[in-house]
Amino acid sequence: MNSIISPRGAAAPIPRRRLRAPRLLALTALVAPLAMAQTAVRIDLSKPGVPVSPTLYGLMTEEINYSYDGGLYAELVRNRAFKDDDKTPAHWSVVQDAGGSAAIALDQRYPVAATALTTSLRLDAARASQGHRVGIANAGYWGIPVKPNTRYRASFYAKTAGAGGVPLTVSIEGGDGKTVYAQAEGGRIDGEWKRYSVTLTTGAKVKPTADARLVIATESPGTVWFNQVSLFPPTYQDRPNGNRVDLMQKLVDMKPAFLRFPGGNYLEGETVATRFKWKETLGPIEQRPGHRGTWGYRSSDGMGLLEFLEWCEDMKAEPLLAVFAGYALHGETILGGPALQPFVQEALDEIEYVTGDVSTKWGAQRAKDGHPAPFKLRYVEIGNEDGFDKQKTYDGRYAQFHDAIKAKYPQLKLISTVNGKDWVGSQQKLTSRVPDLVDEHYYYNVMEMLNDAARYDSYERSGPKVFIGEWAAREGEPTTNLYSALADAAFMAGMERNADVVEMACYAPLLVNANPGGMQWKSDLIGYDVQSSYGSPSYHMQKMFRNYLGNVSLPVHAEKVSTQSWQRPASKETPLELPPVTQVPTMFFSATKSDQRGEIYLKVVNSIGSAQTVKVDLAGAARVAAEGKAIVLGSAQKEDTNTLAEPTKVVPVTSKASGLGKRFSYSFAPYSVTVLVLSTK
Ligand code: AHR
């Protein structure tokens, strides 16, 4: 029994796939000391190979680990609409300088008309005068990032008790209020709600720091109400309400073919009422009520449906849209039939919002929201992990969605979340309809993943294609270490060898705020605080695989692969087919070619702490150049990792490789993954 830290319950046990003995159709396992025999790999170029799906590698995302609020979504103010806690103004504090005296409190008496802004923050400035300012302060998501020569856009709604007018200043200043990094007059506030906006620009000499806060202050006594207090730094491609530049760049660099959104558990909601209600995430941000997510905090919904789509656009990735299918995380289920129909309609409307032209109701809404051009959509997933539905209603629910969507959008490929061969989804069977793809999820420790890296070598070919919608080796936190990256690489090599059945895959979770309290899921790909970000070893490995994917997967046959004994921990559920001590291979291979570039990519994982030499035979190759390139990700210790403090400790190194040819021997470094680029020109 594996455990996943999930809102299904702390360390909720996940019923696991049945572990099998290593299935190495392509690998012949040897229980042998390493020195005994040399591993040999034969890549058969006389065979046509199988096309690699151009959508093989994408990204998966949801609001978890402060992925959007406090992460990718560039808003810097935490709890901007004062709804995070209905009793206290969480993340806000009162400013009382030099004898000024004031108090702050939530106030629900004065909603901003015609908006979703129902709770405001009241500042009662009892004593304030020149040099004795009072105000409200927000320290963001573990700080506000101050950088030199940077323009920030601050905005807020405000009103006073009377028409008299209270002047405000807006500043980004040090945590102790002593250093002012940027300041502007906020305007004279009167008795009606109005939106005010100012630009704050830091000077050239400002030293970068996260020890800063946003302050809106006055030197006049009186009462001021605030709502939707917002502060944005420059965003990726300058999109209003946009994304953080460094994180977007890291994602763009992965060249993802698709983005699976909005979840994950976040799609489902803890209850049906708190599912991702896409219609409530549209339009100006003041129209979005926000909602409680599934990972213990509220979402502002600043990252709404259109923002997800524009995020795809910015990455040149296609959306893989998951629609709510009537099952919520804590077990609430809408039975198939008339009760489910409104949810089916909600999904149809959502697809129309994404793809419809402006003559359609929801296409017109998208145009009104600022994006007249429809988005390309080819994949729709029905639900998330419906194998957990104890009432086993997915078959009927899926059929209802399937029929309605295929009737209106026959071109769409539909993805089922159950009927994977032997993961959690297999607890339910889908018999009424045949989906185009099945979403399988795998969260493993390193040895489990190495042990199962060849799972698709013996996968049933006659069923739907596979979408591995979530997967990861889970050692190292908040982002995983080199050992996990090696196991991930072994698993990806398996995906590439089986490109005929694995059509799409995306690792999860993608993002984690590395501050204490920022992480809910312990193994993530990209870590950050408000100032900077870094990729885990697996992030770099995945970029290597993406950059050298090729368009054809070549048959690989490996022999004399050494193995290591793996004693499964006693606490694990007794696997049905696996003895307590298992022999797990220590090398993993995939070979692909790019017809366009005239290159062959041999990917090799060495999961142990000593170098291993491999005899490579490129059978049937017309020509292979003696010189090529080796891109190697490795380190001395398998626990080595990247962090905010050491962001590039484990990164790939590219060097010239020589002595290559149709037949050659190559030594692969300890604890490494290597892409050998072989030129056939
Ligand atoms: O990736 C974290 C969670 O794992 C996802 O939200 C859910 O689908 C799975 O259980």
Image (cartoon, rainbow, N blue to C red):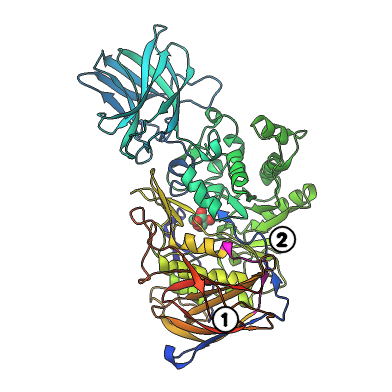
Residue labelled with disc 1: 23
Q: Nearer the viewer, residue 203 or 41?
A: 203
Q: Residue 119: name its quadrant.
A: top left
Q: Which residue is mark 2?
A: 436
Q: Is residue 564 magenta?
A: no
- Residue type at mark 2? Asp
* Residue 311 circle label: none
Local SS, label 2: loop
Above or below: residue 448 compared with residue 439: below
Residue 396, percent from left and from top: 69, 56
- Residue 469 placement (x, y as % from top left): 58, 59
Left or right: residue 593 versus residue 638 is right
Magenta span: chief secondary structure: loop
For residue 225, side relative to residue 97 (left or right)? right
Q: Earlier in the sequence, mark 1 or mark 2?
A: 1
**In-front residue for pair 625/375:** 625
Lateral position of residue 563 relative to residue 602, left or right: left
- Residue depicted at x 45% and y 82%: 612
User: Is the residue marked by circle 2 packed among few (<14), some (14-19), or many (20+) residues within 10 Å?
Assistant: some
Q: Is the C-beta separation of discs 1 and 2 under 8 Å?
A: no
Q: Is residue 622 above or below residue 267?
A: below
Give x and y (percent) for residue 311: 58, 44
SS assignment at label 1: loop
How many labels, in total?
Answer: 2
**What residue do we see at 58% from left, 35% from top?**
280
Write down the region rendered in magenta.
546-555
Mark 1 CB in 8 Å range of ligand 1? no
Q: Please state which amino acid type lies under the numbered disc 1.
A: Arg
Q: Is residue 550 magenta?
A: yes
